[in-house]
């Protein structure tokens, strides 16, 4: 249920209604908007809730939340969520540019590349220290040493670190270094990991599973939100279809659909979504036009010799050109980069 308070409702009335929701065996979540406050009453559905809550002093109306994802739903919160972590702000009017290599290869490499990317307009630094690879024989990342390398790059540039965490037991260690915990597509429904990331309080970048529906995607986000962590970003990174001309199929219609159904910011990953460097820039431009709040891009100064995903990595020169193009597209849809 959503308890919509009157615009002139007092804090005493709001607190009273939150207490009333608790007494009914539900969990209250108070959301203060620009013009009025709403209180979510979350828990098991039961008869008589509207009748019990609607007479409350200061209450304007009580409405059911129809979507199965309660906290992520735009029914609960009309205003868009903005997630901020150091240099990175995702949501609002400014489009975030998260860039970096697929894998952290050395401290010299990541520090040098981070400096270049910041000068070209990046607002966040991506890089894998733990790498989930299809083959057990592929490079798996430098793990904690890789996290230290990312921290060194942040110290030099101030760029927020976005890096993947793969297991619940790794969350405390990764959270010690990272500013944003990325949950990869293969872990979207690893519910223990989602809960651990929620408990960490760190901003989360949740990637859509390659075979997940949008509803399953939003319910995965619900696991993080349900632990009291509101700082969740949704990332469309492509789904598996019958097509084989790209690594995955990047369905950009997901972007405006998520913007309609949820208040959470939406990031697009055209690197994994296409798997081909020549397609990254066109799909990134299209994502901005479709309403994405940010892009996450694999950028490498020598893609031919990258330790992972060189085929889908663009060069800094291409990134510079793309940032300039995205600025012009953003202006056409009343946003900035």
Image (cartoon, rainbow, N blue to C red):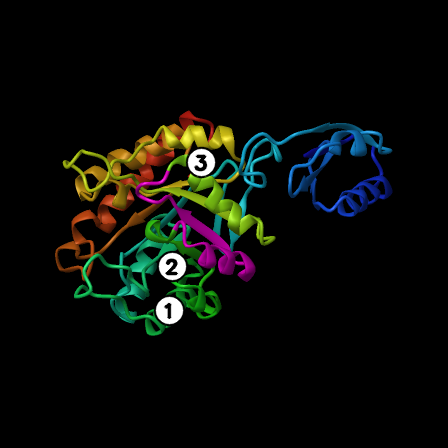
Disc 1 is placed on an element classified as: helix
Q: Name the residue under label 2.
A: 163
Badge 1 crowding class, 10 Å Cα cut-off, few under 14, some 14 to 19, many 20 or more, is many
Marks 1/3: CA–CA distance: 33 Å
Near-viewer residue (245 or 27)? 27
Badge 3 crowding class, 10 Å Cα cut-off, few under 14, some 14 to 19, many 20 or more, is some
The image quarter in which residue 234 lies: top left
On residue 169, the disc is: none
Residue at screen point 46% across, 46% down: 220
Residue at screen point 21% across, 65% down: 139
Residue 134 drawn above or below residue 264: below
On residue 215, the disc is: 3
Is any atom of residue 293 visible in this view?
no
| Dot placed on the residue nearer the N-terminal end, 2 or 1 | 1
Disc 3 is placed on an element classified as: helix
Q: Does the magenta stretch include residue 206?
A: yes
Residue at screen point 80% across, 40% down: 17
Q: As drawn, is 40 to the left or to the right of 234?
A: right
User: Which of pointers 3 and 2 indicates the residue nearer the eye?
Assistant: 3
| Dot placed on the residue nearer the N-terminal end, 3 or 2 | 2
The spot of residue 261 in percent (x, y) is: 50, 30
Marks 2/1: CA–CA distance: 8 Å
The image quarter in which residue 214 lies: top left
Marks 3/2: CA–CA distance: 25 Å
Is any atom of residue 24 visible in this view?
yes
Near-viewer residue (140 or 217)? 217
User: Which of pointers 1 and 3 indicates the residue nearer the eye?
Assistant: 3
Residue 256 drawn above or below residue 104: above
Give the magenta-colored segment's residue range: 188-212
The spot of residue 319 in percent (x, y) is: 27, 45
Q: Mark 1 points at which residue?
A: 147
């Amino acid at each position: 249920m959503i308890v919509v308070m009157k615009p002139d409702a007092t804090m005493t009335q709001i607190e009273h209604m939150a207490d009333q929701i608790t007494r009914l065996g539900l969990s209250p979540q108070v959301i203060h908007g620009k013009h009025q406050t709403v209180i979510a009453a979350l828990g098991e559905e039961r008869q008589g809730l509207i009748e019990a809550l609607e007479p409350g002093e200061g209450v304007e109306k009580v409405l059911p939340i129809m979507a199965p994802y309660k906290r992520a739903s735009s029914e609960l919160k009309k205003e868009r969520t903005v997630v901020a972590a150091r240099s990175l702000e995702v949501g609002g009017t400014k489009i975030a540019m998260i860039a970096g290599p697929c894998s952290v290869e050395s401290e010299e490499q990541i520090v040098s590349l981070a400096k270049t990317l910041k000068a070209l307009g990046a607002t966040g630094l991506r890089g894998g220290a733990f790498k989930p690879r299809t083959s057990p024989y592929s490079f798996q990342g430098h793990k904690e040493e890789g996290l230290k390398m990312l921290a060194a790059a942040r110290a030099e540039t101030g760029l927020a670190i976005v890096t993947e965490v793969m297991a619940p037991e790794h969350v405390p260690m990764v959270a010690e270094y990272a500013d944003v915990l990325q949950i990869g597509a293969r872990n979207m429904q690893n519910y223990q990991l989602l809960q651990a990331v929620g408990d960490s309080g760190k901003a989360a970048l949740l990637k859509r599973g390659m075979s997940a529906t949008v509803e399953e995607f939003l319910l995965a986000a619900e696991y993080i939100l349900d632990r009291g962590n509101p700082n969740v970003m949704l990332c469309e990174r492509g789904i598996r279809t019958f097509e084989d001309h790209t690594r995955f199929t990047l369905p950009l219609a997901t972007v405006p659909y998520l913007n309609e159904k949820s208040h959470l910011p939406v990031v697009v990953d055209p690197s994994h979504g296409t798997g081909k460097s020549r397609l990254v820039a066109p799909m990134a431009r299209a994502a901005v036009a479709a309403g994405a709040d940010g892009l996450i891009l694999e950028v490498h100064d020598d893609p031919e010799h990258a330790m992972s995903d060189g085929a889908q990595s663009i060069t800094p020169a291409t990134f510079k050109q793309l940032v300039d193009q995205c600025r012009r597209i953003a202006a056409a849809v009343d946003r900035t980069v």
